[in-house]
Image (cartoon, grey):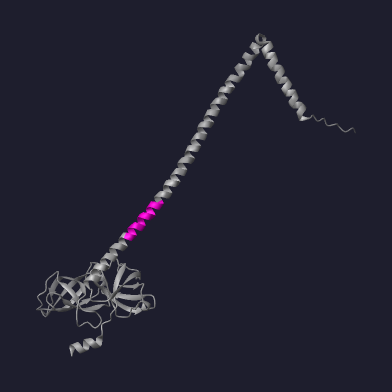
Amino acid sequence: MRKKTKITIDPKYILILIVVISVLLIVVSFRFKEKMAPVQSAVGNIITPMQKGINTIGRKLSDQMKYVNTVKKLVKENEELQKKLDELSTENKLLQQDKYELDDFRKLYDLDEQYAGYPKVAARVISSDPDNWYNTFIIDKGSDDGLAVNMNVMAGDGLVGIITDVKKSYSTVRSIIDDDSNVYGTFLKTSDSCIVSGNLQLMNDGVIEVSSISGNAKVKDGYEVVTSQISDKYLPGILIGYVNNLQMDASNLTQTAYLTPAADFRKLDMVLVITQVKNSQELKEMLE
């Protein structure tokens, strides 16, 4: 069986042939222009619609490319604007945080000036019980900062509570609104004594309890109650709050009332700790 011989043509010869044919067609077109007119017309009738179609498709493709490029540009600009917006939002939050901290420091400064006779250190609240009130909470200062158990804690316009436990770098505070808290108080205007007791249930109405007020005490709603000299843990003269809803007991011997605390126990961020513990022995000597 004879094997078929494969014929191969060099591409350069094909290119030369195409060039020659093209030149011949050009020469023929010019040499026999009049005779070629019908052919040119026929070819034009075929090619012209094709050109229109190609031009229409080209314009649509061009418009589509412009649309895609515009969309890409808008998406990029939107991403850049969103990035700037996020940066501005972060800066705004930081400015708001700085403002709140500045307000807190101003309040602490005013409180420090009000009780200038007591040595104090500022501390930040870093944890609290998972409820609506700061009845017990933790601050970021401890024994390494000179703090000790029974040191008084203040915020807002007055007393917050007392330190009950101290570690090296943090301390636990029990506030005056806690159910286990009892503070000896004195009416600033009349020097009548009373007992301020924590009550978390009443704190939902923004008040705690005041009891053991003498039935003869000439006290009125709105009077200030401060820590008493006879307290064994609380230093004297610290504002606890303001009494309201005074009522005489059934025995007519004592009165009870509610007290609105001087500190806001819905939110505590910064506090002042009085770095002085009341000396019970000194108190005993005073009472002898």
Most extreme residue toward the right is: 1
User: Is residue 253 rendered magenta in the image?
Assistant: no
Report the residue at 73% width, 23% height from top: 18
| Image quarter (top left, top right, bottom left or bottom right) of the C terminus | bottom left
Q: Does residue 43 appear in the picture of this structure?
A: yes
Residue 149 x/y as whole percent = 32, 80
Q: Does residue 202 appear in the picture of this structure?
A: no
User: Is residue 96 rendered magenta in the image?
Assistant: yes
The residue segment tinted magenta is 86-98
**Closer to the camera, 154 or 193?**
154
Residue 73 x/y as whole percent = 47, 40
| 248 is higher (above) or lower (below) than 97 | below
Residue 176 x/y as whole percent = 26, 74
Report the residue at 71% width, 19% height from top: 23
Dividing the picture into quadrants, the one containing residue 196 is bottom left
Dividing the picture into quadrants, the one containing residue 24 is top right
Is most of the magenta stretch helix, strand or loop?
helix
Report the residue at 34% width, 76% height from top: 172
Report the residue at 75% width, 24% height from top: 16
| 26 is higher (above) or lower (below) than 146 | above
Most extreme residue toward the top is: 34
**Closer to the camera, 95 or 78?**
95
Residue 199 x/y as whole percent = 25, 73
| Image-based side of 169 in relation to 186, left or right | right
